[in-house]
Amino acid sequence: MILFLIGFLSIIGGLIGWKVFDCDDGGLFFIVIGIAWLAIVLIAIPISLQDNNANIEEFKSVQASLLEARSNTSISEFELATIQKEVIEQNKWLANRKFHANLWLFRIFFQTKKINTLEPIK
């Protein structure tokens, strides 16, 4: 929400500077910056949400695969080490996403409810 607010304030400030104070160049500059800012935010949010959806589904898939591989009794030590390494990487990704999803500034880019329902792989 604050990202939208920054864009709108920039546009409003530019309009005030342009119309009220007769500051043609400065006002126009802030209007253009505000419009560009809003365009970037409006493009980045859907892309970010879609990327996070894909990452969440990938995490669930890897989690299911790793749990099934662990139940295999004929697994070598090297395969077990590889599985453990993958578990560590996936849990690291999940911890990173949970941290950023719960920060007030980044909540708009993450699906906080979906990420917070995921549990680390044990």
Image (cartoon, grey):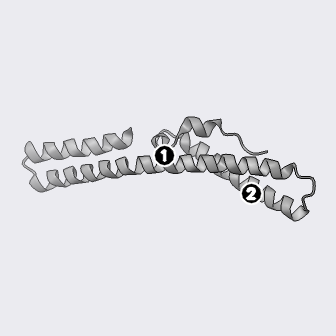
* Foreground pick, 14 / 74: 74
Quick check: 83 left or right of 48? right
- Name of the residue lying farthest toward the left: 22
Query: In which image quadrant can residue 13 be found?
Result: top left
Q: Give the position of the C terminus as an image quadrant.
A: top right
Mark 1 neighbour class, 10 Å CA radius: few under 14, some 14 to 19, many 20 or more: some
**Amino acid type indicated by mark 1:** Leu
Question: Mark 2: which secondary structure?
Answer: helix
Question: Mark 1: which secondary structure?
Answer: helix
* Foreground pick, 55 / 18: 55
* Foreground pick, 8 / 120: 120
Instruction: Tell me what residue is drawn at x 21 percent, y 53 percent.
Output: 32
Mark-to-mark CA distance, 1 and 2: 24 Å
Q: Residue 101 in the image: state x and y as whole percent.
A: 55, 42
Mark seen at residue 25 = none
| Figure check: 1 above or below 41 | above
**Amino acid type indicated by mark 2:** Glu
Query: In which image quadrant can residue 79 be found?
Result: bottom right
Q: Residue 102 in the image: state x and y as whole percent.
A: 55, 39
Check disc 2 and report the residue beneath it. Answer: 86
